[in-house]
Amino acid sequence: MRRALRTLIVGAVAVGVWYSVAPPVVGHFGIATSWPSTVPNVLKFDARDYDNPTRCLPRARTPFGPHQPYRVGSMHVLVGDDFPILVPHRWRPSDPAPVILTVRRSGDCYTVYSLEGGP
């Protein structure tokens, strides 16, 4: 009985540490987590920094409008599949940097990042 209780307590502490420590630590390195679902504060793309991430938004509140989004990259996730980085129009590396990037975190959960600084 004591062994089961000790295992339960150690497991609960491990989950608590993961939940509170993992997101800010890996977010510092530009990596997202899927549980809890978090994204870093700064997204690096095409040698530019994007910041000011929004909270989870439905697709209707993203810049896509009626357009089909185009995948231009992916955000690494600590455990699980990477999150796609999307833009509303076709984009090539020779084009100017997009002003807004959107990360699809799950079914209808999107996070919007805006370009930091000037040209």
Image (cartoon, rainbow, N blue to C red):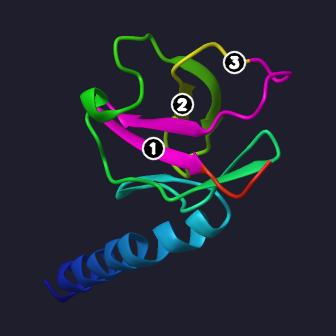
Picture quadrant of residue 104: top left
* Residue at 62% across, 34% down: 74
Q: Nearer the viewer, residue 78 or 38?
A: 38
* Residue type indicated by callout 1: Val
Few, some or many residues within 10 Å of mark 1 (<14, 14–19, 20+): many
Asked which secondary structure carries label 2, the reply is: strand
Q: Nearer the viewer, residue 4 or 18?
A: 18
Q: Earlier in the sequence, mark 2 or mark 1?
A: 2
Few, some or many residues within 10 Å of mark 2 (<14, 14–19, 20+): some
**Magenta span covers which residues?**
92-114
Picture quadrant of residue 109: top left
Q: Position of residue 82 (x, y in %)?
A: 55, 36
Q: Nearer the viewer, residue 64 or 3?
A: 64
Pointer 3 and pointer 2: residues touching (CB < 8 Å)?
no
Residue 82 visible here: no
Q: Position of residue 2 (x, y in %)?
A: 18, 89
Point out which mark residue 84 bears.
Answer: 2
Residue designated by label 3? 91
The Cα–Cα distance between marks 3 and 1, rounded to whole angstroms, is 17 Å
**For residue 71: magenta?**
no
Quarter occupied by the N terminus: bottom left
Closer to us: mark 2 or mark 1? 1
Residue designated by label 1? 112
Q: Earlier in the sequence, mark 3 or mark 2?
A: 2
